[in-house]
Image (spheres, rainbow, N blue to C red):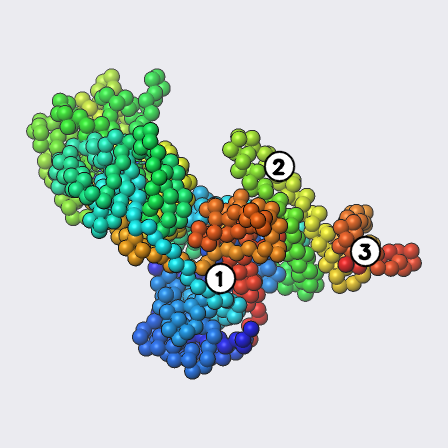
Amino acid sequence: MSRFQYPTNTRTIRVLCTGQVDPTYLLKAFKHGADGVMVIGCRLGECHYITGNLHARWKVDLTKRMIEKIGMSTERLEMRFISSAEGTKYIEAVKEFTDKVKSLGPTPIKSKEKGEKIKRAIDSLISTASGYRIRAVVAKIQKMMEEGNVYNEKIPQEEIEKIIEDTVNTEFVRQSILLCLRENTSSCVKLSEKINVSPDIVLSHLSHLRKNNLIDVDRVEERVPLYKVL
Amino acid sequence: MNELRIGVFVCKCGSNIAGFIDVPAVAEYAKGLPGVVFARHNLYSCSESGTQTIKDSIREHNLNRVVVAACTPRTHEPVFRAACEDEGLNQFLFEFVNIREHCSWVHMQERELATQKAKELVRMGVARVALLEPGEMTEVEVIPSALVIGGGISGITAATALGSMGLKVILAEREKELGGMLNDLYKLYPTGEDAREFLDKRIKTLKKFKNVEILTSSEIKDIEGYIGNYNVIIKEGKKEKDYKVGTIILATGALTYKPKKVSKGKSLFNYDGKNVITQIQLENRLIKGLKEKKVVMIQCAGSRVPERIYCSRICCMTAIKNGMLLKKANKDAEVTILYRDLQTYGTDYEDELREAKKAGVKFIRYSKEKPPSVDKKKKFVSVHHELLGRNIEIPFDLVVLSTPLIAHSDVKKLSQKLKVPVDEHGFFLEAHVKLRPLEFATDGVFICGCAHWPADITESISQALGATSKAAIPLLNLKVTVEPIISYVDEEKCTGCGICEENCPYAAITKDPETKKAKVTEVICKGCGICASNCPEQAIDIKHYKDEQFSAQLKAAFEEVKT
Ligand SMILES: Cc1cc2nc3c(=O)[nH]c(=O)nc-3n(C[C@H](O)[C@H](O)[C@H](O)COP(=O)(O)OP(=O)(O)OC[C@H]3O[C@@H](n4cnc5c(N)ncnc54)[C@H](O)[C@@H]3O)c2cc1C
Ligand code: SF4
Ligand code: SF4
Ligand code: FES
């Protein structure tokens, strides 16, 4: 062991392989107050469990998109590929990352004005990342990319990114609505203010959620319907 | 669930930890953590008296969870797990917190902050241990036979060693002959032995073992299974045969890089296979007798360059050896070796270099920026002489390029069949260079020789013997125990979508034809977690690395600390 020194403000959590890294873990770390999260896997193509770090790369990518949605810098999340024999590289990566995160300042979670709001937004992201749709899309897309390669019919990167982006957008709004309604019954306009999404979009999601029996109209006050979760 | 009774043991590791961390303060802090009923510090927890203290405390305080904050689980986890088991506490209810490699050794100048960090690491460990569940090791029966793939010197050595233990061995070589690269060599450094004789002697010994089945002209068609129980289909000529083996040794060796011949364009140092040849072609010509007198060798031809950044390790010694042989055969021979750096590691090899210089082999250094050029018309090699500071021209009859060893082009196929990784250059990648050499993350498969990295015969033989002893342990024990760190499916949640099955790199998950739910074959599963992170229903968890255990650890990592 070389006993290289590195900053004390890092905590390591061991996974057997980055293949297990779930977007929900990364989001939970942010929720609990991490200023930055780094995923360190083997060198690309050299995962000891063959494909683990390729999967992780997708998950990290997805999580970056998600935190960007709520105004958190994507630089707070990073994946590096370092072999277990490259101690110095590991130290360098940790140092670089802590420096970068330091320059970004403390996590917005800790901010007095915005903290609570961002925490709630992360909760919606965690629900989004736990939901069937986004998980299935990410899992399937990996396969599509691979198989695309096998038949040499590469699916354009932009197309894939668009699918992911759209799914994240939709699911995030829906989960945010559900989260608000779980606390209080609310109207379309109020919801729109609370989650910062235009009323017409909120309305379209409300009708989708209603169709799927996730919410319903609780009562109508002054001609305005108030919704509740089922 | 029973009331939590967690015991925490913080180790000083002599001064390794206590020198940089306030260990008693960490133990004191641990006492206040939820579920902790007992905490203390030890001088050396792993010592006889240290483990005894742990055992006594488990008994006296009726502990049902144990945390040891000490060094690395790599070496010491088994010790503490055994101590728990001795007291009837399931070994999976134990958690190791590394406050040495992750703390004291890496924050030697910051006692206070390091102490703080150690407390937090202990807090994370306590949060995790509270949620751990007991587990049982699975025992798997082992078929006492081995497959060795590749019949070069590494494979021959491995098969002979396994054969001498009385084990059944299948040695599969795809060429017509055993021997690999040695078939093309003339004399061997550092002993000067004749390669043919050396090889024949070893093949003869190997063939004495009736329990070793040698298959030549044989390809591995298919491999499936897991440690102890592999089914292998080998195609020998036109016949296909099935074998059952318990462990596998990979000894598929390497090739020498042959520069591409280009008719009009340029090839590396004007390589043509006639007047500009490679070392292995030279060895072949030496066997028949060489006429050329003026020989220029160029080292690092195609290695330590951006496409192949590695050093091939054997080429310096090969050039020195062949230079000497040329000088010995013909006093008037002129041999010049152009090198970038010379690697003659160890005492024997350095001696050979001195001998070669004494015998009159000339050594001239060149730099990567100013490589030599070969003029085939005028028959000289031009090189920038670093000491003279100008170009010099060396006449030649023959130019020999020391090209590197490279991986076989079809190595990926084998790596996919065996589910073991290769590095960017196609050499097989062991689990860890220092901690788990010659092994893979996939239990039951081992690696040796040039398939692993360029190596000479001495090294190939040592590695082959190392791989053999590792491969033989389960074969002689007739059983292996496998850790229950594997995935399991919550059938209530599973919808049978098949995503996990598609993504498992080991094909450990299949759909149960009756329930239509995902089902894990426990001995195949490696616990990598890929299925879990991809399951859209979050129906999969990894035992001992469960979702809720991570979540608890994450939460504990960021709690505000009261100290
Ligand atoms: C020019 C030259 C000179 C050298 N001189 C010396 C020397 O003087 N002294 C010294 O110590 N070392 C020397 N070496 C190094 C020496 O050749 C190697 O250390 C040695 O050959 C390594 O043996 P191996 O069994 O690992 O690999 P190999 O010799 O490459 O044997 C591997 C075998 O596996 C077979 N195989 C490959 N793929 C498959 C597959 N998929 N299925 C079945 N079979 C397969 C191959 O056909 C081959 O027979 C020299 C090397 C070269 C190139
Ligand atoms: S991915 Fe999940 S839901 Fe789909 S089959 Fe596997 S365990 Fe079941
Ligand atoms: S953890 Fe899942 S993906 Fe990994 S080997 Fe086991 S079943 Fe396969
Ligand atoms: S083992 Fe998969 S990333 Fe390291």
Are there few (<14), some (14-19), or many (20+) residues within 10 Å of tag 3?
some
Q: Chain of mark 2?
A: A
Image coords of residue A192 (percent x, y) = 79, 53
Q: Quadrant of the C terminus of chain A?
A: bottom right
Q: For this rendering, which residue is in front, B242 or B492?
A: B242
Labels 2, 1: one chain: no
Left or right: where does residue B305 sit relative to residue B325? Answer: right
Give the residue displayed 38% in from the left and 80% down from the top.
Answer: B56
Numbered disc 3: secondary structure: strand
- Do marks 1 and 3 share a subunit? no
Q: Measured from the top left, where is residue B362 in percent x and y?
A: 16, 33
Mark 2 near mark 3, Cβ–Cβ under 8 Å? no
Q: Residue furthest front?
A: B514
Q: Which residue is mark 1?
A: B544
Quadrant for residue B102, please give it. Answer: bottom left
Chain on which label 3 sits: A
Disc 1 element: loop
- Name the front one of labels 2 and 3: 3
Nearer to the camera, B493 or B459: B493
Secondary element at tag 2 = helix
Residue B460 percent location from the top left of the image:
24, 44
Asked if residue B132 shows in the view, the reply is yes
Camera-nearest label, 2 or 1 = 1
Quick check: can you spot residue A74? no
Q: Which residue is mark 3?
A: A216
Q: Quarter of the image for the N terminus of chain A: give it.
A: bottom left
Q: Which residue, as the protein is rendered here, is positioned at the far right?
A: A222
Q: CA distance from mark 2 to mark 3?
A: 37 Å
